[in-house]
Image: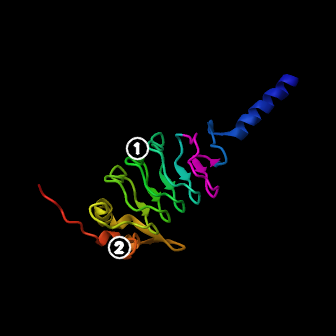
């Protein structure tokens, strides 16, 4: 009887600690394949995010940067919420392995530029939020983002109590011009 009770307690402890056989990162909530680590004043992304994660909520923290390779094991990720942080830059290739990503929310950060090719592997992306970032619209640094928004204007949104298609919501710091209106001269050699 003692053994059966002890075994039941161990099983219950495992069920409380893990979802779908995967541990939930510290101070996060997990439900199915959704991981929520929001509103916690985090300065870094928690370790141990399960590779089966399809939705990752990291909004409203104090993230200033993301390490390279952070999302490399999250190939099933479909939605990534990074808004309302203090992100100042994104490392080249940080989203490259997120080939299933359909939704990316980067609004209300401190992003000034996007590395060349940053969104090129996100072939399934159908929603992105880029507004309320102090975009530096000097050429050649803004060229990639400006071109990318022009080519993908049908997926750039603004949120105002509902999802609104607004490709001009990404604005240049200072001038307030839409990022996609900036045309950088091409150089030939």
Q: Which residues are magenta?
A: 30-50
* Percent x, y of residue 148: 31, 61
Q: Quadrant of the C terminus?
A: bottom left
Between residue 4 and residue 167, name the one nearer to us.
Answer: 167
The residue that appears at 88% across and 24% down in the rendered structure is: 2
> Mark 1 or mark 2: which comes first in sequence?
1
Q: Is residue 36 magenta?
A: yes
Q: Is residue 13 magenta?
A: no
* Residues under numbered marks 1 and 2 in contact, where contact means CB atoms less than 8 Å apart: no
* Percent x, y of residue 140: 27, 61
Q: In this figure, which residue is indicated by the disc labeled 1?
A: 97
Circle 1 crowding by C-alpha within 10 Å: few under 14, some 14–19, many from 20 = some
> Against 186, is 54 above or below?
above
At numbered mark 2, what does the secondary structure look like: helix, strand or loop? Answer: loop
At numbered mark 1, what does the secondary structure look like: helix, strand or loop? Answer: loop
Circle 2 crowding by C-alpha within 10 Å: few under 14, some 14–19, many from 20 = some
The overriding secondary structure of the stretch rendered in magenta is loop
Specify the label residue 11 is tagged with: none
> Against 158, is 88 above or below?
above
* Percent x, y of residue 117: 31, 52
Q: In this figure, which residue is indicated by the disc labeled 2?
A: 178
Tell me if 184 is positioned left or right of 125 in this view: left
Between the residue at mark 1 and the residue at mark 2, the CA separation in whole angstroms equals 29 Å
In which quarter of the view is residue 145 placed?
Answer: bottom left
Q: Quadrant of the N terminus?
A: top right
């Amino acid at each position: 009887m003692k053994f059966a009770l002890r075994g039941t307690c161990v099983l219950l402890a495992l069920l409380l600690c893990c979802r779908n056989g995967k541990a939930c990162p510290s101070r996060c909530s997990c439900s199915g394949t959704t991981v929520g680590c929001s509103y916690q004043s985090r300065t870094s992304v928690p370790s141990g995010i399960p590779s089966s994660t399809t939705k990752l909520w990291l909004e409203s923290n104090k993230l200033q940067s993301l390490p390279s390779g952070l999302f490399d094991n999250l190939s099933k990720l479909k939605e990534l919420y990074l808004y309302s942080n203090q992100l100042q830059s994104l490392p080249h290739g940080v989203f490259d392995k997120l080939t299933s990503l359909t939704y990316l929310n980067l609004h209300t950060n401190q992003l000034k530029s996007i590395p060349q090719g940053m969104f090129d592997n996100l072939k399934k992306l159908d929603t992105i939020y880029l507004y309320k970032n102090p975009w530096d619209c000097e050429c050649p640094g803004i060229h990639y983002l400006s071109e990318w928004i022009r080519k993908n204007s049908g997926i750039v949104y603004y949120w105002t109590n509902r999802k609104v298609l607004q490709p001009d919501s990404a604005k240049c710091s200072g001038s307030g011009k839409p990022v996609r209106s900036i045309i950088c001269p091409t150089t030939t050699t």
